[in-house]
Image (cartoon, rainbow, N blue to C red):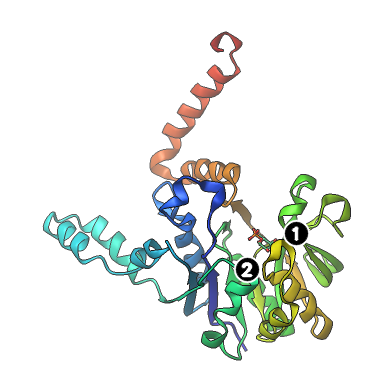
Amino acid sequence: MTVKKALIPAAGLGTRFLPATKSMPKEMLPIIDTPVIQYVVEEAIASGIEDIIIITGRGKRAIEDYFDDSPELEMHLAKKHNTELLKLVRDVSSLVDIHYIRQKEPNGLGDAVLRAENHIGNEPFAVLLGDDIIVNDKPCTAQLIDNFQKYGRSTLAVEEVPYEKLSSYGIIKGKPLNDSLYVLEDIVEKPSPENAPSNIGAIGRYVFTPEIFDCIKEAGTGVGDEIQLTDGIRLLNNTQTIYACRFEGKRFDTGDRLGYVKSIIDFALKNESLREDVLEYLRDILVTVDDPSDK
Ligand code: G1P
């Protein structure tokens, strides 16, 4: 059995990016000219996903508009014979079949996942959190799907997390199977660094068997008075083996302010038409930043 449906929770308030996110979804923050959520959708498609459900909330209309047709803009570009931009705009709205479900109030990641239960039904599905962009020839989600196809079991993407960031992640305890795979023994949501079971954290990519839904419901409210996906994973682990996969690829945590700045610099340096100018600018400012006479 393969994985054809994916869920992208995008209902969070984006408080780390206030005031910008007061009137704009954090998922629409651009990495130069492309909103973060487009990279996430593209990763899902490149991993073989055919049906995407985005969980939105109040103030997230811009996401739906973004992936929809844009007749006025298209007409304007067509009139100006700007075929290149016209193609760009049309390509976005014809990417894939996207469905939207609204989460009435932000009540945790677990609750956002539950909103999609009816749409997903009794089949495995992927979850891609909108904050992470992961760059690799073989997409991270495709790596998790491979593992799912091998073992038929839920699989989480994990990576090492710096000590001071442990309390921002679900941290796992795992039994290594090989260089890149653990059998999950436990997972704790946002532990204090002293109490963390390891330094390996779940990042925003998962593949689940549908039994996760009942486990989230059974787990109820957790840390921060929210329904936590991690608590559901913990319960699922009592009845089904779960794997944690050290994925291949470079992850950009665009939900973090520094991570966001880093991703813009990296993507600019990867962009042929920007690279040389950006490098020159960086060299210039690095000289002045290092020069004490400039202070
Ligand atoms: C969520 C999950 C957490 C996971 C993290 C990855 O937390 O609850 O287990 O490690 O995503 O980004 P959030 O970042 O939504 O607070």
Label of residue 31 in the image: none
Q: Position of residue 118 (x, y in %)?
A: 54, 87
Which quarter of the figure has residue 237? bottom right
Q: Position of residue 211 (x, y in %)?
A: 69, 86
Q: Say if residue 276 shows up in the picture.
A: yes
User: Which residue, as the protein is rendered here, is positioned at the far left?
Assistant: 79
Does 82 sit left or right of 132 as displayed? left
Q: Mark 1 near ligand 1 (CB under 8 Å)? A: yes
Viewer-proximal residue, 103 or 174?
103
Viewer-proximal residue, 132 or 47?
132
Q: Residue at x 74, y 48 (%)?
A: 165
Q: Mark 2 near ligand 1 (CB under 8 Å)? A: yes
Q: Residue at x 83, y 50 (%)?
A: 193
Viewer-proximal residue, 38 or 27?
27
The mark that comes first in sequence, 1 or 2, is: 2
Viewer-proximal residue, 28 or 159?
28
| Quadrant containing the N terminus in the rendered view | bottom right
Q: Is residue 130 above or below residue 277?
A: below
Are the residues tagged 1 and 2 within 8 Å (C-beta)? no
Q: Quadrant of ligand 1?
A: bottom right
Element on which disc 1 rests: strand
Q: CA distance from mark 1 to mark 2?
A: 16 Å
On the image, numbered disc 1 is attached to which residue?
A: 201
Q: Position of residue 286 (x, y in %)?
A: 55, 23
* Amino acid of disc 1: Gly
User: Which residue, as the protein is rendered here, is positioned at the far bottom?
Assistant: 122
Does 292 sit left or right of 171 as displayed? left
Element on which disc 2 rests: helix
Q: Say if residue 45 shows up in the picture.
A: no
On the image, numbered disc 2 is attached to which residue?
A: 109
Label count reads 2
